[in-house]
Image (cartoon, rainbow, N blue to C red):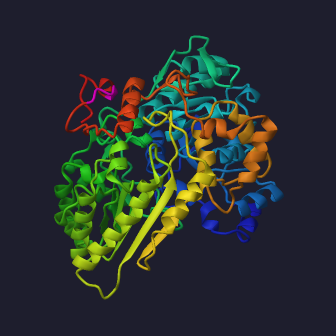
Amino acid sequence: MDKKLEKVLRRVQKPARYTGGEYNQIIKDKSEVDLRVAFCFPDTYEIGMSNLGMRILYGIINEMPGVWCERVFAPWIDMEEEMRQEGIPLWALESGDPVSDFDAVAFSLGYEMAYTNVLNMLDLASIPLKSADRPGLVPLVFAGGTSCCNPEPLADYIDLFAIGEGEDMGREVLELFRRAKKEGWSKKEFLRRAANIGGVYVPSLYDVKYNNDDTIAAIEPKDGAPEVVTKRIVEDFENSYFPTKSVVPSTEIVHDRVTLELFRGCIRGCRFCQAGFAYRPVRIRSVEKLVQQGIESLRNTGYQEISLSSLSSSDYPGLKELCDGLLDWCEPRNINLSLPSLRADNLSMDIMKRVQRVRKGGLTFAPEAGTQRLRDAINKNVTEEDLLESCRVAFEGGWNGVKLYFMLGLPTETDEDVLGIADLAHKVLQTWKSHAKSKSRGVKITVSTSCFVPKPHSPFQWEPRITMEEYRRRVKLLADNLRSKAINYNWHDPETSFIEAVLSRGDRRLGAVIELVWQSGGRMEAWSENFSLERWLAAFEACGLDPAFYANRARSREELMPWYRINMRVRPEHLWRERERAYSCVLTPDCAAHCTDCGASTLMKGGLCCG
């Protein structure tokens, strides 16, 4: 270990974040490597090491002969201060080498509030921030992840974006990059050719023009760039790569367990949910494959818990058989099986008995809205009867606590809908009083609300976000009507989600704002103790931009969105139709019941339906 680093680690929180040396990390001989990739996660070690997508891509890239992928995480505030004071550049955990030594720097972007961390990590690595200021082929800076559904806010800083799932696309980009290095291509030539890889968006190959009212007039491709960049997916999900020998962290992380991915996509079509549309079509792994992967992962890591992961795990068709297959191996070893993402309309005592055979975890439901009218508007096909019946089953089964998640500010929401949340919470409490297996420990009902953020490529992408003042009013209205010691109410601050709404729907003019926020000390903006709304508002004013223009403005169907050239393979016509159905409170059946011809099925060979 570097002497400077060794000295610094004694003065910072959680030094294990920065040391590497974990069990199952991948070390390669540098003499046998001709392409080095710094895989950067723009948040803390604890968050990044919990990210399944990062684990998958780390393993896939390292399977490529001659390529070495190493992990890099954003340092916490105290560590960054020490690094700058001691002149320690950002480094990769496996080798300890500075990121500036690497050929490619890849960022995983899952949350817009991490954008300032991207710039900070580049600066800590002594890499010029803007793509235009990096004229050479090396280092190549690229990014992928859910936030890349709208890549425009970081367009000036990232050389290329990977749109969609990266398993196949990542290999193709790196093989082309390796060829470019070997044959001495210019950066311009490489990017021009990379733009022909399916799913690759090169922002420098598109010129943006604006109208007098600041809306977008045109996004024009040049130098042979495609008119539309269509997301990539893994078609053979059953046999796709899964990291059964993942790196075991050297300190506690957020999700400190094996995470087993049941399927991708979601059949439900909730109109507020970007992920439900962006990850279509649904692709499912078999019970046999999942049991094999789960047992191998537990053996290779020593974890004492395994979690079943998807957007809606209780929709997995073989859930009972999967739980039994895993528990036959886990139970004798006292390994816990957890099942998040449960739906209130298909929970059964049979499943609950299975997942509590080792030890009982928490129980969480997300009704999202307080009244049936609003749940129908957002296509959350869950009734009050569904929720109360699931709670009855849980309370009779010995549970004495439940968490309920809602959103405030959904399109068409009224005060009656807000008060409906309080009414529903009190009905859950009454259900416990009537059906609890034991009342000796009391009950804890937690109600949490966040402010709805309209996201690109969802039916509500045209909708405005309610103002911060209006959100606070609705929070107070709800809090005043949740008067019970058994009910705890938590709400997310509206300031962070206001900036999230700006960044998620913004254009490339926001790059200057992000950079100015970073220059003003913006770091770890996703963490409440570091977030400063004043800093963001000052940056907007300095750049001559109005954040409300991006966050609080309704958009017409004719307006060109900043993500106009990105095709997530759900037709805009389908999204608009779903928006209209929301205002009529008309439900759309899930994909398993009826194909709505959203466009996702055309991604699959043979035009298979996503259900």
Q: For the C terminus, which image quadrant?
A: top left
Q: For the N terminus, which image quadrant?
A: bottom right
Snapshot quadrant of residue 135: top right
Q: Position of residue 560 (x, y in %)?
A: 56, 22
Quick check: can you spot residue 187? yes
In the image, residue 476 sits, relative to residue 281, either above or below, namely below
The reply, left or right, for residue 402 in relation to residue 437 is: right
The reply, left or right, for residue 548 in relation to residue 393 is: right
Q: Position of residue 341 (x, y in %)?
A: 34, 56
Q: Position of residue 429 (x, y in %)?
A: 33, 73
Task: Please name the predominant secondary structure of the magenta segment in the image.
Answer: loop
**Front residue of this view, candidates 439 and 468:** 468
Quick check: can you spot residue 397? no
Residue in view at x 55 percent, y 59 percent: 492
Query: Magenta span covers which residues?
Result: 596-600
Q: Is 17 a magenta residue?
A: no
In the image, residue 496 sits, relative to residue 430, either above or below, namely above
Q: Position of residue 118 (x, y in %)?
A: 66, 44
Residue in view at x 71 percent, y 47 percent: 120
**Front residue of this view, candidates 195 and 378:** 378
**Front residue of this view, candidates 130 and 187:** 130
Q: How many badges with numbers are in the image?
A: 0
Residue in view at x 52 percent, y 21 percent: 558
The reply, left or right, for residue 302 in relation to residue 471 is: left
In the image, residue 26 sits, relative to residue 552, either above or below, namely below
